[in-house]
Amino acid sequence: MARPSGLLQWHQTVSTYLPHLSQPQLTVLVLWSFGIVLAQACGLTTVAVPLAYGLGCPAMTLRAQLRDWYRDAKDKSGAKRGRKRRSLEVTLCFAPLLCWGVAWTAPPCRQLALAMDASTLGQRFTLLSSSVVVRGCALPVAWRGVEATRAGAWRPHGEALFGALQGRVPADWTVMVLADRGWYARWLFTTIQALGWHPFWRINRQGHYRLPTSATCRPLTQGVSRVGQRWAGQVICFATPARQLPCTLLARWDAGYRAPWLVLTDLPPTAGDVAW
């Protein structure tokens, strides 16, 4: 099977950042990722056909090889005939992927942005993910699929995702963990702080806050009430005792937006900006 020079170079790059993979796992991952770029799609057959054409091998053979990569060991081709097969433990890739993202960041920068996201598939599944934001892209480095509607299903997986990434960013770097509305949870805020990182989370306007020197709660809607306003200060956010959080509230309402943006962080009020 002929191997294009670009494929050999990509094989060397992937092996550098994911050295824990076995050679068969590494080879098929390289074929998968190279084929996705070649096909500009990620469907099994859509990737296999042009990739097989470029490599000069049978498409169905390559398709079976690609399919086996994400199957459990017992379901891989040949497993029932006694051939040794291994499942891919994807969580072992999370820390190396983060290190790869750090390597992509310009050395003088010493800052890293991680974006958290929860994408749903109807009422069936939610994909929790954390991605390195670099060069205009969000590159997933850790993820987990959970049941969409089961109460309390996110916490153990959210903690595990960040636990897998612990210690993989240089200690003197500033790490911002960004999240949009719907991701807020006090336990997750404090989990990120325990890593030495900084939450930077947009929240909904439903709720209350108070100043540390006051016992009176105010609606979050009063933070900024019209276009052109901005405010930043240390607050105790939320009125429910179990949810209360000492933090910095950043509020800003720019022209062209139907509502203000409200962001919670642990940075000093003068160190953060909603525009980030």
Image (tube, helix red, strand yellow):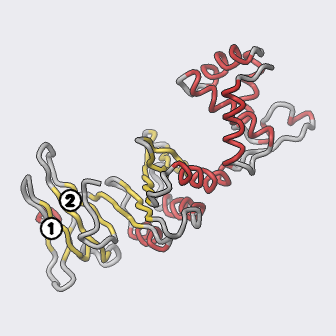
User: Can you see residue 143?
Assistant: no
Q: Quadrant of the N terminus?
A: top right
Count of number-bearing discs: 2
Q: Residue at x 29, y 65 (%)?
A: 264
Position of 150 relative to 127 (above/below): below
**Three-letter code, disc 1:** Pro
**Please, is residue 218 above or below residue 133 in the view?**
below
Q: In terms of depth relative to the viewer, which is nearer, 188 or 228? A: 228
* x then y, percent, for residue 191: 47, 70
62 or 30, nearer to the observer: 30
Q: Is residue 100 above or below residue 23?
A: below
Residue 76 is left or right of residue 203, and the answer is right
Percent across and percent down for residue 258 are 14, 46
Residue at x 45% of width, y 55% of height: 114
Which sits earlier in the primary sequence, circle 2 or circle 1?
A: 2
- Location of residue 96 in the rendering, given as x and y in whole percent from the top left corner: 64, 53
Q: Callout 2: few (<14), some (14-19), or many (20+) C-alpha neighbours within 10 Å?
A: some
Say what secondary structure mark 1 lies in.
Answer: strand
- Kindly identify the amino acid type of the residue bearing the numbered disc 2: Arg
Residue placed at 6% from the left, 55% from the top? 226
Residue that mark 1 sits on: 219
Q: Is residue 121 visible?
A: yes
Relative placement, left or right, of 69 versus 249 is: right
Quadrant in which the C terminus appears: bottom left
Please rate how many residues cluster around mark 1, counting C-alpha atoms within 10 Å: few if below 14, some from 14 to 19, many from 20: some
Q: Are marks 2 and 1 in contact (CB under 8 Å)?
A: yes
- Based on the displayed image, in which of its 4 quarters is residue 165 positioned? bottom right
Q: Indicate the secondary structure of the residue bearing disc 2.
A: loop
Residue placed under numbered mark 2 in the picture: 205
